[in-house]
Amino acid sequence: MATTRRNFLRLLGGASAALAARLDGPPAFAQAGPVKIGVLAAKAGVTAPVGESGLRGTQFAVDRINAAGGILGRRIELVVEEESNPKDTVERFRKLALQTRVDVITGVVSTGVGLAIGPVAEELKTLWLAWDATTQKGVEETMPKPRYSFRSVDNEAEAVMASILTAKHFKGKIKTVAGINNDYSYGRDNWAAFLAIMKKLGMGVTPVVDLWPKLGETNFTSHVAALGQARPDLIFCSFWSGDAPILMKQAHAAGLTATIRFVMTTAGGVHESLKKAFTPEGMILGYNSMYFEAPNASPLLREFVRWHQERFKEWPNYESDHAYFTLAAYRAAVEKAARAAGGKWPSPDQIIEALEGMEVESLSGKRSYRADHIMECSFFQGLSTYRNKHDFVTVDPLEVMSTRQIQKPSGLGLYEWINSWKA
């Protein structure tokens, strides 16, 4: 029998009854009204697909939690605002916190916006669970000891993993490299991390050109021409949204994909748009922290992929998992803090203390928050392949690394950490 939404919710309802029976502590708080959760999601420009992915993961989490009785009996009510430029997004953050008076705010994917939101969350003492935006400037954390901000993984984690895989697959096969990355902190951090690791791992490569198109650029004609003139052995790129397939299509038209190796650290975020017609096999392709066809997928991931495909006729990407995790962690923290508070609805400070070190099951597996409020999770990358049922590339073999391997420890600088590696 096909799984309809009605059947799905009925099954969840049964699961919720079993779950409720296991909770031994706090009473329900339904009379207190809904838990209001503010969401800041990109809806326009090249970041729109990522924002939409986060919203889908949010909706899946809310459907599950509400079908299971809400958070201690209180249903979740979403209040969605748009993430755009830093100034306007900060104003919407203040509106959610001060006028709508939400209980918690999630969302934000842009590093530039995250740099602006972090200090405001601390100023307003408003709990902010970021989907993706970090609070790093360059590779230095701007809020080493935040109280109200819980952040995603460090920007450069996917560059670190891609660099390690570059050494694994291409050592001795490349002598020159080129970079094309967006001209802001994320792009520059990734390229710098890649070059540092190439040196540390004794790759002996020479950078021949680095290009910095603006975020949102969609015409790469001049950049592709420059890459063609430089003729590197490998091109490193950290594009993560709608610009990635545009670059690949233009590079393919110029003949670059036939002779040059590619490393795309994060383009798996728009994987369905990486069509076989213009995307090469053998390219290192990163999916950030969730891979929709993971061979060892959990029942939760399989359920989400099925739900996503049935509802949107698309295969999901990692931003859904970032968003799902923030709500799953918030719910678990409220329940944990309420038990510790003797059955009372916990204060924000009590919820924060519960979140620190909290580990929950997310779509991609176990995820947690470190004591410094940074996420821990797994990353997924591999070599692109045409061997699948789709019209776009996937990866085989799939490689999985924990952020405990590819993210700098708390208190260490990125290059201090890389230089501490044993070659």
Image (cartoon, rainbow, N blue to C red):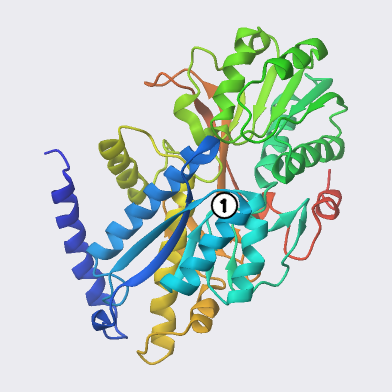
Amino acid, disc 1: Asp
Viewport quadrant of the N terminus: top left
Q: Position of residue 265 (x, y in %)?
A: 63, 35
Q: Give the residue at mark 1.
A: 132
Q: Position of residue 88 (x, y in %)?
A: 57, 55
Q: Residue at x 55, y 48 (%)?
A: 84
Q: Nearer the viewer, residue 53 or 14?
A: 53
Q: Residue at x 84, y 40 (%)?
A: 196
Judge left or right: residue 158 versus residue 2. right
Q: Is residue 165 shown above or below 247?
A: below
Viewport quadrant of the C terminus: top right
Q: Is residue 27 shown above or below 119?
A: below
Q: At numbered mark 1, what does the secondary structure look like: helix, strand or loop?
A: loop
Q: Residue at x 49, y 71 (%)?
A: 97
Q: Position of residue 2 (x, y in %)?
A: 14, 38
Report if residue 364 is visible in the image. no
Q: Is residue 59 shown above or below 238?
A: below
